[in-house]
Image: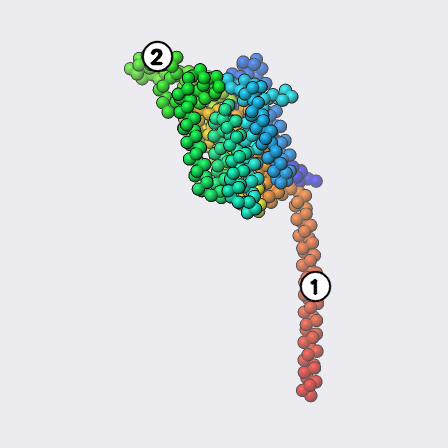
Amino acid sequence: MTKSDLIKKIFYGDISVWVIFLLLCCLSLIEVFSATGAQAFAKSNFWLPIIKHTAILSFGAILVVMLSHIHYKFFSLAILLLPIAGLMLLITPFVGMNVHSSTRFLELFGFQFQPSEVAKFACVVYVAYWLSKRGKMSDSAIFKIILWGIIPVCVLIAYGNLSTAILLGVVCYMMMFIGHIPLKKLGKLLLSTLATALIVALLISVMPPDTVNKYMPRAATGVGRITRFLNPEQSSESKRAEDAQRAASAKNDSVFIITDDNYQINHAKIAIARGGILGKGAGQSVQRDVLPQAYSDFIYAIIIEELGIAGGLGVILLYIMLLIRAGIIARRCESFFPQYLVLGCGLVIVIQAFTNIAVTVGLFPVTGQPLPLICQGGTSTVMTCVYLGIILSISHFGAGMGKGIDMKEETEEGEGEGNDGDENENESATDETETAETADENIDSTVNRTDE
């Protein structure tokens, strides 16, 4: 077996998806290494952050290879994770670990993970599975079953992470739209969701702050982020008087005051402004040392500062290409389940990426959604690799793209057998022609005899 054959045997699936995956991994290693300077200094170990990130990416790459060799039909078993994920989400507020002032992580055998990421994956598979039953069940029954499974999970996620719940809801909604769920039902779902959100927001606004902080600790954070996004000049109550005084004096000198409330987003904007067209060069960022979560939520700002607008557009293009390839793979699949599953996996990655980018450039309120596969992370990076592994599996087994050496040999053998068959057919055709000619000669001689 040659080296080329070995590569083909290992890397199953669409070659374009593999190229996108490897490019994102390479960019991730460069930018995380650049952005974790402050983190390395705090831990007194220069190499520890990048070694940890490299280990997670390596594990994710192995996971992608393994999943790409598994037939997509086995992924339907992942719907069994939905009740398990729901149970984990239910107990997380009580026994979870407090990280960055929020209880979103569970610890199992010494490893920390986010149950919400597992729930997202389970929901995508769940929706794809039931949409694939169209034709065997009524649209109304499928729609109700999907809502019974998705709504409780989204509510549980929203308690600790509203942005993730909204992202999951949008993905599932788009999957149902693609799956030809009647528009009337989808319209009613959208209106009822917006009405419920409005009622909840009104209830939170009239509730005493102490009650909100006690029973819904993340609600105040979400309201504050939305308020600061809609009104950037407004600061928190404790700093408003001081900031107003500083801002009033600053107006005469045309000086912009950065407060604790707008610290993250404004330093991200500074990083973007410094980048220009081609950037300052890899490892030359200045804002990485002052921007909180420069290696995570706001790594896109560091990418633009170091690689410029050209590098930022290149990242966007990679995600767009991934979604396009997912669509192409879906079109080549003959079964419903792989079609909906590959589109769901592509939508989760790309919508999350665009949400992170929109937050960084100031188009969305701060959400805390990481940039898939690029920023430093654990559960998010691993689950992104799971989605990519499933996409590659479906491209191989469902769409017949990027076939390995074994399938190639079978094809060649089939072609050889086909050639042998053609030769036999040609020989048979020749024999039949000769027989027909002999029969014609016999008929002619019989006719001649009759004439005589």
Give the secondary structure at mark 1.
helix
Report the amino acid beneath label 1. Answer: Glu
Which tag is nearer the camera, tag 2 or tag 1? 2
Q: In the image shown, does 346 or 429 lie closer to the viewer?
A: 346
Q: Compared with residue 81, is residue 225 higher up or lower down, i.e. above or below?
A: above
Q: Position of residue 413 (x, y in %)?
A: 69, 50
Q: Is residue 130 left or right of residue 357?
A: right
Q: Position of residue 381 (x, y in %)?
A: 56, 28
Q: Compared with residue 9, is residue 217 higher up or lower down, i.e. above or below?
A: above
Q: Position of residue 351 (x, y in %)?
A: 48, 33
* Res. 383 mark: none
Give the secondary structure at mark 2.
helix
Residue sitting at x 70%, y 74%: 438
Q: Is residue 265 visible?
A: no
Q: Quadrant of the C terminus?
A: bottom right
The residue that disc 1 covers is 427
Residue sitting at x 43%, y 34%: 192
Q: Residue furthest bottom?
A: 452
Q: Do the numbered discs 2 and 1 sit on residues whose CB atoms are within 8 Å?
A: no
Q: Earlier in the sequence, mark 2 or mark 1?
A: 2
Residue sitting at x 43%, y 26%: 200
Q: In the image shown, does 67 or 38 lie closer to the viewer?
A: 67
Q: Quadrant of residue 257?
A: top left
Report the amino acid beneath label 2. Answer: Ala
Q: Quadrant of the N terminus?
A: top right
Q: Is residue 413 left or right of residue 369?
A: right
The residue that disc 2 covers is 241
Q: Position of residue 204 (x, y in %)?
A: 42, 22
Q: Quadrant of residue 366?
A: top left
Marks 2 and 1 sit apart, C-alpha to C-alpha, by: 98 Å
Q: Is residue 141 visible?
A: yes
